[in-house]
Amino acid sequence: MALASTVLLAYLIDIPGQVESSHLTWAAIAAYLLYSLGLYAFPDALHAFSARPWQHWLDLAWYGLLTALTDPATSGIFLFYVFAILVASFRQGSVAGICITFGSAGVYLGVVFMLSRQHAGVEWSALLLRSFFLVSLGIMISLWGGSELSLKKRLALLREINSLSNPRFGVDHVLDATMEKLRLFFEADACVLLAYDTDTERYTLRESNAARPGGIPAPIPAELARSLSPFGSHEAVCFSAIDSLDRGQRRPTRVTDLADGHWTNAPSDLGQGVADILNAGAFMSVPLQAGRDGGRLYLTSNGLRFRDSDASFLAQAVEQAFRLIEHVKILDRMASVAAAVERRRIVTDLHDSAIQPYIGLKMGLEALREQANPANPLTTPIDRLLAMTSSVIKDLRNFVHDIEQQHVASADALASGIQERARRFRDHFGMHVEVEIREPLAVSDRLAAEILQLVNEGLSNVRKHTRASRCRILLASHENMLELRIENPCDAGEPPRFEPRSLTTRTRALGGHVAVDTRDRHSVVHITIPT
């Protein structure tokens, strides 16, 4: 809008008195001003429009039209092309900026060539000098904008890595999520982690790829581990089997000592052997240190060449990530020790304050049942209470046993656990619970245990605070988020607004969010948790 206003102002003032304008020129300026005002007046439309890759080419079309309707040799429209290059470079990177640079030069020279066929005396030397200046300045702006955009993306990755370090998810979840983030950022085919455990003196290999983000570490022989890591413990490596610029010649392995950051060439066979084992055409690798343990992280690709700067940044990202993972390990170890002490106390308290009273209640009900006449109408309710009491005692004993054995609900048992809770609420309280679980569920064992607690608490809230005789549970996993919906109808009318405080507290501790919807005579608690 500022550019359009500048053109309009220049033609209105016309200080030298040499501007030759026509109705078509004024119509083009007015149309460009209205176009700019529309984008300025509707910022939401501007945001959606500016994200389109062809938006910069539309700008070039406007500038080409204005150039054609003015004098290309003296018109200030020529400078407008620089703004299109700036926006393309800083929004979409160097490649887009360079394309717009040559597109601008092409549009400008094309318009001049068309006008030269109608008007004689075109000063080609001055116009070519302008075009050369535009291309030179555009390339510099494009490289600058691409570098700025790359730095912003790298900072965003480091922030995401920091947000992944939630100790409640466990070390394996944080490690898998970090490896997948690194793979996606560098657009690699796979991320491979070679780790050495000093306690067991064993090597393990873990891989994350598009087909299976995250994986179970598999033990490998020491000979294979040594073949995968023929480099120094402080060296980052960048290798590509074939360099297209070298006419099919093998490219040397690039190696740097992370202490000084100076890259040198090593024999190509050094990297080729590792590439053959990883079944990759190119890879970059950095060392890692997690406490006393060590290893290497590899990013592999069969269609992409990695640069030295990529490997240097990967080393920085891995150092930060594994520092956080080591912090999670320490917290997990401290939590395990504290949990063991608390577990022993809970087992004792449950046996004395919960199980024993229920056993006494059961014995009293059995004695009452023996005294009751078979024809007594209270016999059936007493039998139902006896069955319910026996079921509660069994559940409490299983719960105590699981606490003693430090059992954690597995991800595979999550679906069956939810179905079991639905059956229990139907049998004990007469509430029909419909369960819908959309496979596959990408959750860790710890998160599965937390989900079971959330489901149990949500069903209890429906039973205690509503008169609903039915309820629906939906569990699904998509885009690294787990979605849990607990829904119940309200036959009495529109339900009041409420906030499930205990569910909200537990969900926020997992890094998630709780939203409540009370429309159309339904209450829906919508829980989202990152996986």
Image: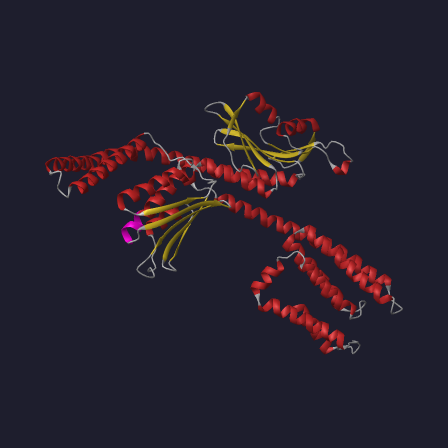
Q: Residue 248, relative to residue 111: is it above or below?
A: above
Q: At 13% from the left edge and 40% from the top edge, which residue is drawn?
A: 375
Image location of residue 259, percent across then percent down: 60, 35
Q: Report if residue 218 lies within the magenta region.
A: no
- Tell me if I can see residue 1 in this picture: no
Looking at the rendering, which quadrant does residue 425 occupy? top left
Q: Residue furthest right?
A: 120
Residue in view at x 70 percent, y 29 percent: 268
Q: Which residues are magenta?
A: 460-466
The picture places residue 6, in percent across and down from the top left corner, at 69, 71
Say above or below: 139 vs 15. above
> Quarter-wise, where is residue 302 in the image?
top right
Front residue of this view, candidates 231 and 400: 400
From what the image shows, is residue 321 above or below residue 80?
A: above
Along the line of sight, the residue nearer the viewer: 524 or 161:
524
Q: In which quadrant will I find the N terminus?
A: bottom right
Q: Say which residue appears at 69% left-offset and 26% top-offset.
A: 269
The residue furthest front is 375
Residue 63 x %, y %: 73, 65
Query: Is residue 254 in view?
Result: yes
Q: Indicate yes or no whether the magenta region holds residue 464.
A: yes
Q: Nearer the viewer, residue 518 or 43?
A: 518
The answer to whether 49 appears left or right of 381 in the picture is right
Is residue 147 shown left or right of residue 451?
Answer: right
Q: Position of residue 462 (x, y in %)?
A: 31, 51
